[in-house]
């Protein structure tokens, strides 16, 4: 029997919890939490992500603002926009949607975000705090993965967790979070230079796949009973669908799912939890602003 780690259902439940908390604060006369997003250019996937974040913000009673800038925006202009949001007391947290156009240095931009408003948890200050186990904004996707494992009671202590992919946004922070006290996995972080990859993935009790390659993980790469977390999200053409496309992950679910003790579907697994984590971080920033418990 496989347990489906249903991110969509869990996200609904947590959003209800957030909405209740927001109502408690606003009924006492406080303004609602405010999440802002900056988006540069017209990348389709980014537009969809930001639209989903905006929709979810409204669902939990947050105020949401989206600042749209054209592709030709300079790094200097973007830094100016960030400074503006850093000093706006009506905005609790904001994100700069990635990727940015090639002529803009992503790290310069991230470094300019005030750590107190960095609800993506991407700034060096928040990454440093996270690694030290201090109070921090945790990057949304790894935070969502931990929430899924915790709320679905997937055992983690002493389990061998293999993470595929070492990005700053997912793999690297996920490896850190999963090995910290309280979660207590033994973590192996694999990347493009890893040798004998399948030998390692077959040892995983928990396999986190964030490699960005459609259906990369196949049945021969997992052991029976693995708990599988698929972070991948890819849109591929499918003429049998009305939309003309379907969404697939980094795992070949048609052959792998039946081997798992638990798995995240794609779509509807990690994705909805990523957005929920962003909302949780924004609520945390808001509570800091108003010194609420
Ligand atoms: N692009 C892909 N994922 C993310 C994310 O979690 N935050 C931001 N800002 N950009 C992204």
Image (spheres, rainbow, N blue to C red):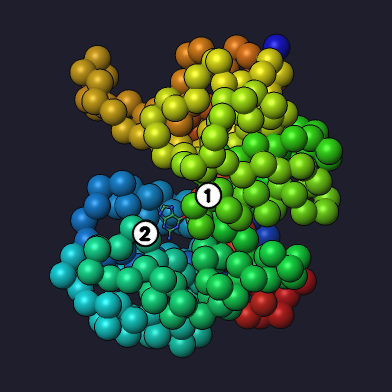
Rendered position, 184 above or below 204: below
Residue 138 image point, x, y percent: 62, 61
Q: Residue at x 57, y 41 (%)?
A: 190
Name the element at disc 2. loop
Q: Quadrant of the N terminus?
A: top right
Residue 169 image point, x, y percent: 50, 55
User: Residue 100 falls in which quadrant of the image?
Assistant: bottom left
Residue, disc 1: 166
Q: Residue at x 36, y 34 (%)?
A: 234
Q: Answer yes or no: is residue 101 visible.
A: yes
Q: Is residue 188 left or right of residue 217?
A: right
Residue 257: assigned label: none
Rendered position, 91 above or below 193: below
View extreme (front): residue: 195
The residue mark sitting in front, 2 or 1, is 1
Q: Which quadrant contains ligand 1?
A: bottom left
Instruction: Look at the numbered disc 2 and say if its residue's Cβ is closer than 8 Å to ligand 1.
Output: yes
- Sort mark 2 into few (<14), some (14-19) or many (20+) by Cα contacts within 10 Å: few
Sequence-first disc among 2 and 1: 2
Q: Residue at x 42, y 39 (%)?
A: 212
Q: CA distance from mark 2 to mark 1?
A: 17 Å
Residue, disc 2: 98
- Sort mark 1 into few (<14), some (14-19) or many (20+) by Cα contacts within 10 Å: some
User: Residue 243 falls in which quadrant of the image?
Assistant: top left
Q: Answer yes or no: is residue 5 visible.
A: no
């Amino acid at each position: 029997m496989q347990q489906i780690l249903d991110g969509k259902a869990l996200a609904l439940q947590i959003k209800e919890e957030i909405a209740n908390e927001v109502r408690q604060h606003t009924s006492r006369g406080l303004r609602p939490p405010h999440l802002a997003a900056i988006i540069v250019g017209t990348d389709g996937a980014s537009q969809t992500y930001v639209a989903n974040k905006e929709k979810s913000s409204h669902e939990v009673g947050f105020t949401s603002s989206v600042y749209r800038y054209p592709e030709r925006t300079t790094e200097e202009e973007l830094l100016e926009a960030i400074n503006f949001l850093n000093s706006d007391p009506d905005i609790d947290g904001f994100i700069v949607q990635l990727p940015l156009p090639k002529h803009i240095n992503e790290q310069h931009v991230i470094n300019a975000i005030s750590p107190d408003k960095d609800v993506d948890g991407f700034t060096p200050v928040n990454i440093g705090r996270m690694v030290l186990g201090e109070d921090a904004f945790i990057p949304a996707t790894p935070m969502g993965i931990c929430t899924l494992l915790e709320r679905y009671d997937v055992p983690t202590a002493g389990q061998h967790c293999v993470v595929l992919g070492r990005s700053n946004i997912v793999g690297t922070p996920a490896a850190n979070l999963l090995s910290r006290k309280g979660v207590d996995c033994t973590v192996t972080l694999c990347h493009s230079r890893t040798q004998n990859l399948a030998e390692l993935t077959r040892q995983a009790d928990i396999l986190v796949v964030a490699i960005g390659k459609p259906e990369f993980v196949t049945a021969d790469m997992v052991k029976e009973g693995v708990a599988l977390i698929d972070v991948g999200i890819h849109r591929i053409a499918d003429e049998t669908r009305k939309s003309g496309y379907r969404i697939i992950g980094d795992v070949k679910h048609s052959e792998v799912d039946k081997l798992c003790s638990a798995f995240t579907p794609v779509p509807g697994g990690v994705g909805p939890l990523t957005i929920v984590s962003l909302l949780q971080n924004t609520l945390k920033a808001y509570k800091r602003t108003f010194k609420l418990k």
